[in-house]
Structure formats: structure tokens, C-alpha cells
Image: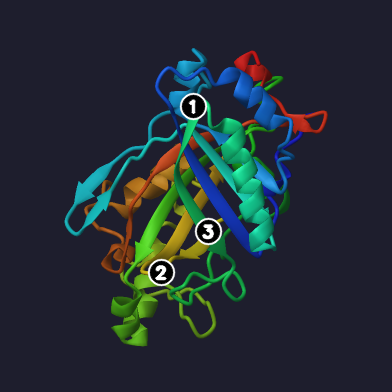
Amino acid sequence: MYKIQTGILADVPPLARYLIFSLKAEARPDLLLQSLVKNIDGDSTVIGLGHSLLKVLSKNIEGLKAFPSYTGSGFDVPSTPASLWIWLRGDDRGELLHRSLEIQQLLSDSFELKNVIDAFQYKDSRDLSGYVDGTENPQGDDAVNAAIVQGRGEGLDGSSFVAVQQWVHDLAHFQAMPVSEQDNTIGRRISDNEEIEDAPQSAHVKRTAQEDFEPEAFVVRRSMPWADASKAGLVFVSFGHTLDAFEALLKRMVGEDDGTVDALFNFTQPVSGSYFWCPPIKDGKVDLSALGL
């Protein structure tokens, strides 16, 4: 029976830290990876491997690829490939710091830490705009079917693909909008979280209604707000049994289907975009057998 990294389907934690690594020149990462995964439980720490890392290992996971980029009127969606993504989950910021330092030290011979993002849960899992995030997330078996690879064999079953983007909000601009305009940007009323039936076609909820796609484009979102001294926004995290559903949603957001661009871009922009493969768990450890490790 396959086992998943349980943090993928668990509720978002009170606090999180995201570590994004690139490979150093002439890196030999296989031994370091084997050492690292012995200390990763898939629950308090979730790991994802990037396409560039697999290329260095001369391995391939069918379905893992480069993140797409888009440019249009008023938006840029960048592709920022990375080799390794680690999501630290917990409720003590100091403990997360020490765990991240241990991982960074362990990987230092072959991996360079490119970005660290500290995230947190805001109120009842709301985005910093004030709107509830993840309202339409599938639950239970539907979440497993949406997010987890099944029927592909040992080493792959129980794994997942994840899309990760860091979005930077212009909260001053958003808060200056009338509440009705804010609601129409999101497609829900902030007062009761109810969907607005006659919202504009550019409303985010209408652009990304997962059941409106063929096939349906359900993903499991585990996004969290982030903030530093000068900026704030959302770390968008979307798990799927393939990357197809996320790509369908993203294409709709940028207007590839019908020319209508998602109204979210009026107050927020992504500054990164990466894909990773999250291996399954076997015997309590991350299973890298699909990579021959």
C-alpha cells in the first residue's frame, strides 16, 4: 500500500517556512539527497524535487516539466525553476528556523539556498486581502484523487506534483477599492463568503471554477500568507496527481482561452513559479526508488 507525505493533505499549519534550493556547479547531489530524506517525515516537513535536479541525476519522472511563463496586458507570470523545495510546517518560529539551518548545512556541499519565505495562517485561513482561501478545495477521497498519484506502480504511487508561486499583493491599492469592487475581483462577498452569481467574467472565482473545465480541473490548494519588512502576499501551493489541472487554471487566468484576464492581476502579481515532484513515503522514509536511489 502506497503512503503519501501526509503534510500534503493535512490542514495548513499555524506557521511555515519554505526553502528553495538550486544546484551548485559540478554538484553530486545523490548522496546528500539520501542523507536528507532519512530526516524527512513527509508531515512536519514536505519535500519536492525539481526538473533540473532530476536531469543532473539522469532520471525522469513522467509529467514533471518546466513551469510555463506568460506575459500580457498588466501581468507577467514568470517561470523560476528550482532544484529542491522544502516546506517546513509547525507552530514555533524558532523551531522552524533551527530545522531550516540544519537542512541548509546538510545540503551545503551541493545545494545553494536561493530563497526563504516565512508564512503564517491568517485568521480562519484567509488571504491577506481578507477573503477565505481554498473554499472549493476537494475533501476526503476527492482530495486524494485530485492530489495523489495512483495506479502507476511502486515508487510513484503516493507521490504528488506541486506548483508553487510567490505572489506579491498591493494591499494599499486593494483596500482603497470599494467593497463591491473587491467582491467582484474575487467573485465572493467578503461578508459571508458566498459566491456572487452575477460577478464579472473576470472575477477570480469564475475564472477558476474547477468544475467548469473538461476534464474537471480539481487541485488541492495549501496556500499561506507571507510578509516581510516591506512586502506581503500569498505563497500559492497547488498539489495534483498531474500538473494538467493547474495548467488549465493558469491558462484561464491569463486569458489564453477567451482573452479575459483574471481580475486578481489588478492588485497582485506572481514573482516566482516552479514545479516539483513530491515522492511517496515507504517504511517511514521518503521513497526515492523511482530515481534508483
Amino acid at circle 2: Ala
Q: Nearer the viewer, mark 1 or mark 2?
A: 2
Disc marking residue 118: 3
- Is 40 left or right of 126, judged from the image as shown? right
- In which quadrant of the rendered view does residue 30 lie? top right
183 or 87, nearer to the observer: 87
Q: Are marks 1 and 2 in contact (CB under 8 Å)?
A: no
Choose the circle earlier in sequence order: 3 or 2: 3
Mark nearest the camera among 3 and 2 is: 2
Residue at the image point whose x is 51% and y is 16% from the top: 57
When the figure is inspected, residue 15 is found, relative to residue 288, above or below; the finding is: below
Would you name the residue on which mark 1 appears?
A: 63
Task: Check disc 2: other Cα within 10 Å, few if <14, some if 14-19, many if 20+.
Answer: few
In which quadrant of the rendered image does the C terminus lie?
top right
Q: Amino acid at mark 1?
A: Gly
Q: Which residue was labeled with disc 2?
A: 229
Q: Earlier in the sequence, mark 1 or mark 2?
A: 1
Residue 151 appears anywhere in the view:
no
Query: What's the mark number on residue 93?
Result: none
Quadrant into which the N terminus falls: top right
Residue at screen point 69% across, 56% down: 95
Who's the residue at 61% across and 54% down the image?
Answer: 97
